[in-house]
Image (spheres, rainbow, N blue to C red):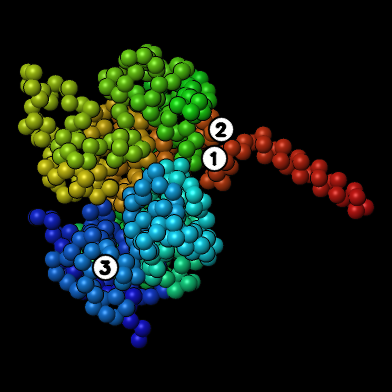
Amino acid sequence: MTAPAIELKGISKSFGPVHANKDIDLRVMPGTIHGIIGENGAGKSTLMSILYGFYKADRGQIYIRGDKTEIADSQAAIRAGIGMVFQHFKLVQNFTVLENIVLGAEEGAFLRQSLARARTLLKELSEEYELHVDPDAKIEDLGVGMQQRVEILKALYRRAEILILDEPTGVLTPSEADHLFRILEGLKREGKTVILITHKLREIMEVTDTISVMRRGEMTATVNTADTSPEELAELMVGRKVLLRVDKTPSKPGEVVADVKNLRVVDSDKVERLRGISLQVRRGEILGIAGVAGNGQSELLQVLGGMQDATGEVRINGEPIDLTGTKSDARTRRARGIGHVPEDRHHEGLILNFHAWENVAFGYHHAPEYNSGPLMDNRAIRQDAEAKIAKFDVRPANCWLEAKSFSGGNQQKIVIARELEREPDLLLVGQPTRGVDIGAIEFIHEQIVALRDQGKAVLLVSVELDEIMSLSDRIAVMFDGRIMGERLPSETNERELGLLMAGITDTDREHSVAEIEANLAHVAGKVV
């Protein structure tokens, strides 16, 4: 029999009182794509970090292609033919693609020779695996999809035969994710072994051969992809049946909460990011903003959340808000009843080196219930944080842990809990379930719908079309800083929304059809 590419036996790892992995056994066969799924905090990333040498297991053995292997650090993992692409990329932003790929793998005393050899090999790898990237481009100038290609090329440059990808589509658009899956299929055809860590059931069903399920640090099942279903996987992950769609009653829109007219933003490079945006969000409804990332959605949230100056007019509950003066800040927006779940939880939603209880209070630390006279009441803040952590099932349920110690999904729950529990008149939500597992997605969606049903207004931005379709009561599509059109979810489909996201309007399609028909008639006349 062929030896497994990877075999883990009895792997256990604890961080203080938290038992992240408990006697894990895992076999991954060569030349396959093996999925590992589980809730946030289930221990998936910890297990793979042990395999890559970032952590050392408390006990257990690792076998690579049948040989017992000690992996003391990442260099040992690389020597064993293992490469890893982390959820948050490990790239030097002001270095070029070529410099990042060579970094740490230089050959000989002269860097110029290493770069020349790397350039040649990079060209071969790019063509072989459809990973085309400009080797001289700086990382800071590349989109996240391209940066991910650089990470994969780094691993292949180091001759990785086993490639681990941790939540690889968390920051990708649907089209970028589809391209990634084609790349993974190409790697598989070349005999590489791929381990895919994800919480997205559609992706795991689409691209894997075998799936292992983890729950609360334990391996609960390993199944052939062809023999299972999304419903079964969801139940194995969470330990109960999970509703894979948003369960909500029809909306009952009330008066306008947010009235936006002719909103414009010009960035520091004099590029117009918002080009006359006008929209309304009413009480008791969720307005979803669909669009490929980078088409103005982020700027829209930042303006409404008080993080970006703009021109135009915005009224909240009929009263104007300052867009360019000293009163244009996030604190003023919160005082006006605007809550904000930002798209980037690491840079805008949390301070990672602070405790969870401190992060629960950030932005609201001036609230009367958090203060006793001139001093902050830390005990009251911690009690409130503990209640929010329990309600939103943040794991581990320890408010003293630093925010960086939580998984991405549990970090998101902390931000969601802080903003939703304030019951704002207008909730701005950016990518609410990015990097979040299926059980937590269900819970977050329920909380957003519950806020809507309380008569609050919700402005939702998401690159996940299925999330936009299922959660929104109305959908507005953005392209190149403009609103291309509005649709009701019941009267549209992903194809129509996709065309609008590409900047193709109904009028454009009519013109295209007319041109095609005219050309066909012209050709037919010549043939006759």
Q: Secondary structure at mark 3?
A: helix
Residue 267 coordinates in the image, percent (x, y)? 46, 27
Q: Earlier in the sequence, mark 1 or mark 3?
A: 3
Q: Do the CB atoms of the residues marked 2 and 3 lie less than 8 Å apart?
A: no
Asked if 411 appears above or below 244 in the picture, the reply is above
Q: Amino acid at mark 1?
A: Met
Residue 305: quarter of image: top left
Residue at (48% x, 28% y) in the render: 269
Q: Amino acid at mark 3?
A: Ala
Residue 285: quarter of image: top left
Q: Do the CB atoms of the residues marked 1 and 2 lie less than 8 Å apart?
A: yes
Quickly name the residue at label 1: 501
Quickly name the residue at label 2: 484
Residue 231 coordinates in the image, percent (x, y)? 36, 59
> Which is nearer the eye, 525 or 359?
359
Asked if 359 appears above or below 81 in the picture, the reply is above
Quickly name the residue at label 3: 76
The residues tagged by marks 1 and 2 sit, at their Cα atoms, a distance apart of: 8 Å
The residues tagged by marks 2 and 3 sit, at their Cα atoms, a distance apart of: 52 Å
Q: Amino acid at mark 2?
A: Met
